[in-house]
Amino acid sequence: MAAIIARGLTHGYGEGPVLRALDLEVAAGEVLFLMGPSGCGKTTLLTLIGALRSVQQGELTVLGHALHGVDDAARVASRRRTGFVFQHHNLHRSLTALQNVMVGLEARGQSRLPQAEAMCRAALASVGLAGFEARRQDKLSGGQRQRVAIARALVGGPQLLLADEPTGALDSTTGREVMAAMRSLARAQGTTLVIVTHDPRLHEAGDRVIAMEDGQIRSMRKEFAL
Amino acid sequence: MIAGRLPLGWIQLAHQPGRFAMALCGVAAAVTLVFMQLGFMNMIFDTTVMVHRLLRADLVLVSPSFRDMMSTGTIPRRRVVQALGVEGVADAEALYTATRDWVKPDGERGTLLLLATRPDFAAFTDPVITAQQHLLAQPGSILLDAGARGDYRAVLDGLARGEDWRTEMGGRAITVVGRFRLGSSFGNEGVLIASDETLQALALNRAAAAPNIGLVRLAPGADLRATQAAIAAMLDPADTRVLTHAEFVQHTRGYMVSNSPIAIVFGFGLVVGLVVGAMVVTQILTADVQEHMGEYATFKAMGFSNRRILAIVYEQSLLLAALGFPIGLLCALGLYEMIRAAVAMPITMPLSRVAIVFGATFAMCALAGTLATRRARRVDPADVF
Ligand SMILES: Nc1ncnc2c1ncn2[C@@H]1O[C@H](COP(=O)(O)OP(=O)(O)OP(=O)(O)O)[C@@H](O)[C@H]1O
Ligand SMILES: [Mg+2]
């Protein structure tokens, strides 16, 4: 089954399209890397898949639900099935690590489960942050913050994780650790991963690498030798 | 305990103690101001009927031009006698009023309201007065309101030792022979009670045939409305009206509410207090929304509904109302106490007023929250990038 199917996806911000009749299919459980020059439309594509913007033209189906021609409520529902990791951690500065993860669980409607707190603690532990539950972001390193953000995105088991340059603000060693944390957590939950990154050294972790150019898919490289 | 729904509004406020304190001060100041306006307004209205309440009567005969105790008009004395003949009436007597200057213990002059009736007629609700009325049979004798404005401590101490106090009123010598407690109002500094005979001696222009008010008391079991109607049928409406005691109080209170600018002036102050409070809270909540736009965009990208984001702002506004109100109430109670001590006027805090201001505080904060959410409504989840 395909987690994402895009057909003739065209999107613009006023002066000419940014995405031009883009076609893409991502299998469930696949780890896909997306690269391409700045301004080619990678983030735009992610915001469409993540239902943060409405589809202007073309068809887009994510996790079996069409996102073209739907209302705001359908987009909110789709966001709840999707996890996001951003270039910047975007943690809430007044919340502890555990509370930040709990917000992710609340967004998924699972924060009232009796095991909610245990789920959040487990998510933090799985990114190597057991013992950091009560820390606020100003007491965490950049890599730790990004790992909290990953725990927040993956708690509650979304079927799809979208990451936009999640290691962009980190040094390469920390970046590799964060990427590994994201991968192993996603693998354990069978989550489909779509990751935008400019760092080719990270691509070895993926099933497929796609290069975008001028709003279209230009090439795919498959089957990296590990 | 973090399960369920995080109190994000509370957490954000608690993380900005300076801003939180400022918002609480804004709410508390508005609440205090509103309480002061209502307190002063009702104090004025209450003082205008303080003497009404001192009069012991079921029905009251007044002139059609009657407004309040300082402006009563007069009625023919025979109307009181006529009322006595009506079935169901047990007792009726005339009450005379006059405002007179007298010389206070410090030598200054003060204007007091003089009430006078037959010394053997129990015209007053205060048993302290009734018990001393026989002393007034002696011409020139007077009972003094211990709550009157001015320093009467020496006089009151003297009375406690059994020493009368002699002073001068309207060019004549009078003797204070006893005391009671009522309190001053804006119109006069306090009340004096004398016999009708003493009043006529002090106010030479006053005819015994033209009292100011008639006090009528019913026999046990008599019907108030029926007796009122029976008296009214007999009187000439051109010179006398008959009111129940409640109507008598309401007449003056209602007159003050609708014919004086008091309600408008204080109502205006009250609205200003609420508007300023709402503005302060709106400013502070808007600043908090502004500062958390990034977080809110992230929450929306994660699947928070618009409602859930707005709920954070409303949670903050209701918290400010719930915490700011008691602070404002305490301040107001303290100020009320100071006013009671300073001007000897009956400023009180009825529960109904507490409830109304409590409601108004929540309305004010809810309005501020609504204004502050205008910004939060525009949060775009795509702004996370
Ligand atoms: N909100 C917006 N309003 C107007 N134009 C936008 C907006 N977001 C993106 N664009 C434009 O669309 C184009 C594609 O932007 P996008 O962010 O998708 O590129 P990107 O591939 O993610 O680039 P980068 O690698 O620099 O992040 C750019 O030319 C950008 O200027
Ligand atoms: Mg981008």
Image: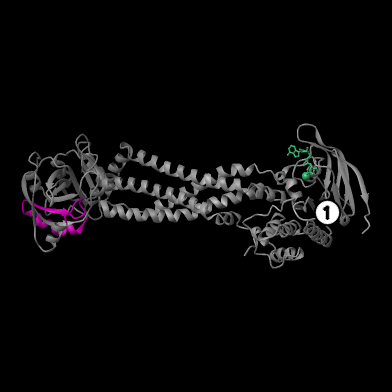
Q: Position of residue B121 (x, y in %)?
A: 14, 53
The residue under the point 66% across, 47% down is B306
Q: Residue furthest bottom?
A: A131
What amino acid type is highlighted by mark number 1? Leu
- Identify residue for label 1: A193
Determine if residue A114 is in view.
no
Relative depth, front residue between A218 and B320: A218
Binning the other alpha carbons within 10 Å of mark 1 as few (below 14), some (14 to 19) or many (20 upward) gives many
Relative depth, front residue between A185 and B217: A185
Residue B371 colored in magenta in the image: no
Q: Where is residue B335 in the image (x, y as percent from the top left)?
A: 34, 53
Relative to A170, say whether A59 is above or below. Answer: above
Say whether mark 1 is within 8 Å of ligand 2: no
The residue under the point 62% across, 44% down is B376
B332 sits left or right of B236 in the view:
right
- Magenta residues span B125-152
Determine if residue B101 is in view.
yes
Q: Where is residue A149 in the image (x, y as percent from the top left)?
A: 72, 56
Where's the N terminus of chain B, which quadrant? bottom right
Q: Could you tell me which chain the residue with mark 1 belongs to? A: A
Relative depth, front residue between A187 and A180: A180
B168 sits left or right of B224 in the view:
left
Determine the quadrant in which ligand 1 lies.
top right
Where disc 1 sits, the SS reads strand
Quadrant hosting residue A135: bottom right
Give the image's coloring scheme: one colour
The residue under the point 94% across, 57% down is A225
Q: Where is residue B280 in the image (x, y as percent from the top left)?
A: 49, 45
